[in-house]
Image (cartoon, rainbow, N blue to C red):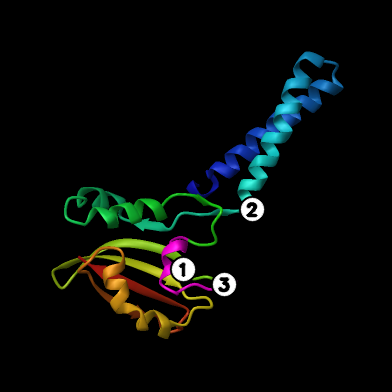
Amino acid sequence: MKKYLSPGNLIVTIGGVLAFVGMTAYFTDSVNLSVPTFFYGVPIFLIGLGLKTSEIPPAELFDKTTFDTNRFNRPKELTALVKDVTRWRYGIKAHLESSLESLNLWDEDNPPQLKEIEEITKEEKNGLRMRFELNAVPLEKWIEKQERLNRFFVKGLESEFIIDDNKKEFDFILFY
């Protein structure tokens, strides 16, 4: 249900309803109601359609309550990163677009996509697991950049890759 409540969907719906009310009022000779609703409804509807063409859904955050309660144990930069990727975004092709571009882990036509994010504990270390869909950027390139990824978001982190059998997705874990 939450995936249908994007700002783009809400604006399209509001604009569509206003335009429909305006057209209905026009054909029933309610001129006072038809003019404002139609002339406000159509532009609002078109703005909503424009948003829909450039929208990216939020990455799925597993166990939000654990994430909120452990906020004092993780670096503030990682908290900001999670808040950024778990909201609707507009005008970009993928979450973390600018970060992946500066790391040279970007392909303009088919960029890697962040699918889900989770706070985990592994071998008594806390970490942030991010599941990426590879798309056109090969896994070898990610592994080659592992040392830079360890210090990119926050200095002094350790990381680990967990590679899926089909090599289309992988988990990247940042330990703090």
Look at 45% across and 74% down and name the residue there: 105
Q: Amino acid at mark 2?
A: Thr
Residue receiving disc 1: 101
Most frequent secondary structure within the magenta stretch: loop
The quadrant holding residue 20 is top right
**Mark 2 crowd level (few <14, some 14–19, many ≥20, 10 Å Cα):** few
Look at 85% across and 19% down and name the residue there: 28
Q: Tell me the CA gap for discs 2 and 3.
A: 16 Å
Residue receiving disc 3: 110
Q: Left of 89 or right of it: where is 16?
A: right
Q: Left of 56 or right of it: where is 62?
A: left
Number of numbered discs visible in the structure rendering: 3
- Dividing the image into 4 quarters, which one contains the C terminus? bottom left
For the residues labelled 3 and 1, say whether their Cβ atoms are less than 8 Å apart: no
**Mark 3 crowd level (few <14, some 14–19, many ≥20, 10 Å Cα):** few
For the residues labelled 2 and 1, say whether their Cβ atoms are less than 8 Å apart: no
Q: Position of residue 18 (x, y in %)?
A: 70, 28
Q: Left of 146 or right of it: where is 59?
A: right
Regarding mark 2 in the picture, which secondary structure is present there?
A: helix
Look at 62% across and 49% down and name the residue there: 52
Residue receiving disc 2: 53
Q: Position of residue 127 (x, y in %)?
A: 23, 65
Q: Tell me the CA gap for discs 2 and 1.
A: 22 Å
Dot 2 or dot 3, earlier in sequence: 2
Q: Left of 50 or right of it: where is 108?
A: left
Name above or below for residue 60 compared with residue 174.
Answer: above
Give the magenta-colored segment's residue range. 95-109
